[in-house]
Amino acid sequence: MLKTVLSIFFLSLFPIVSLATEEPLLNGANTAWILTSTALVLFMTLPGLALFYGGLVKSRNVLSILMQCFAIAGIASVFWLVVGYSLAFSGEGAFVGNFSKMMFNGVTEGSVVGDIPESLFALFQMTFAVITPALIIGAFAERIKFSSVLLFTILWLAFVYAPITHWVWGGGWLQEMGLLDFAGGTVVHITAGVAALVTAIMIGPRKSFVRGNTAPHNMTMTITGAGMLWVGWFGFNGGSALAANGDAAMAMLVTHISAATGAITWMCYEWKKYGKPTALGTVTGMVAGLGTITPASGFVGPAGALIIGFLAGVVCFNATLMIKQKFKIDDSLDVFPVHGVGGILGTFLAGIFASTELGLFSGQGFADGIESMGAQVGVQLIGIISTFVYTAIATFLIFKVVGMITNGVRVSDDEEAQGLDLVDHNERGYEI
């Protein structure tokens, strides 16, 4: 009798074990880390980028910048739910996904990506879709209609951000080639930077830029936001490992080194050139270091990050001067020279410092199937050029369409002088 009962008991375990092995296994540590990283990346936009940008504009436009960041966070999130995630991360197309995951179709409590919940992966990627168009508003700050910002954001996410995300991270042609872009050198920084350059040229300079009166109204706000960006970037780059492991730890380490080096380099360069270091220059150098290390953060070592941060400070500093002083382009908050140039530089340098044969400056190795630095750098250049050209053309066309729909993207001269806080929102940032 006892033997029969034991046999029935052990046999009853087999279906349970079988069912358990059919369920995808979640990694609790990885899930917890990406939950944290997701919050950090959203923190970069709200309140980090909002405060960073808000302090850089005139006091009569501070609320317009904060409002644009908040509105973009909402619009981009809904867009990502409805169609963005599907276009970026579904299907097997080389250039864009399909509509199989519209409205997060199939994203359930039990669906996974790797060993984390798919809902978490989709949310993590959503925060990237939020910050990228938010970066662009720095190019046309203080002179664009609020309605134009909203429409531009939707169209730009659909026709630029989602397809390029698919190229690089969603199984598209650049990923198949072996492009090294750990956390968004092409997807985020080159796209945002190039879009900023195109839109700044198309909308024309601010009246204050022509007069040479573009000083920030509140550097305390800007430095506070910059500090939040620095902290949030740990989730941006470290979270892109999608695991709580050595890759995430190294990504965070090299991110911090590059940011620190970029800040110091810009500060010293400015000190030498103009006689005094400024807070604005120092925090701008920090952002340049962060943007430049982003594509390389999962592939390079600490010594390589030191060189990347130094070059970010030097190259982005000179790019900023060239854009404003030589070409007279009013990229209001230096989006292209910092993020665009930084993204290009970092994507290129990832192909060099990923090498395992550089001694102290060695990284974690090239992409699978790529055995030489020349071959990897070639792929990096293809990624840079294709992202640059496609983004420039698509952004130009989108901005033209937005202008036709909204009867011009720019406010009138009188409205610009009055300030967008009152013109667009009937509010003031400060009581007079």
Image (cartoon, helix red, strand yellow):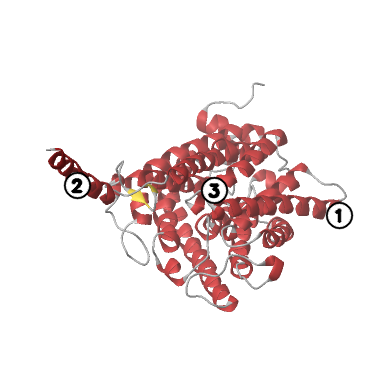
Image side of residue 368 versus residue 271, left or right: left
Q: Position of residue 84 (x, y in %)?
A: 37, 50
Q: Which mark is residue 247?
A: none
Q: Which residue is mark 3?
A: 236
Q: Residues within 10 Å of mark 1 (few under 14, many from 20)?
A: few
Q: Which residue is mark 2?
A: 15
Q: Which residue is mark 1?
A: 272
Question: Along the polypeptide, which appears first: circle 2 or circle 3?
Answer: 2
Circle 1: element type: helix
Outermost residue on the top side: it is: 431
Q: Quadrant of residue 416?
A: top right
| Residue 184 appears in the rendering | yes
Residue at the location (61% across, 50% down)?
Answer: 252
- The kind of residue tagged 3 is Phe
Question: Along the polypeptide, which appears first: circle 2 or circle 1?
Answer: 2
Q: Disc 2 vs disc 1: Cβ atoms closer than 8 Å?
A: no
Is the residue 82 above or below the residue 195 in the image? above
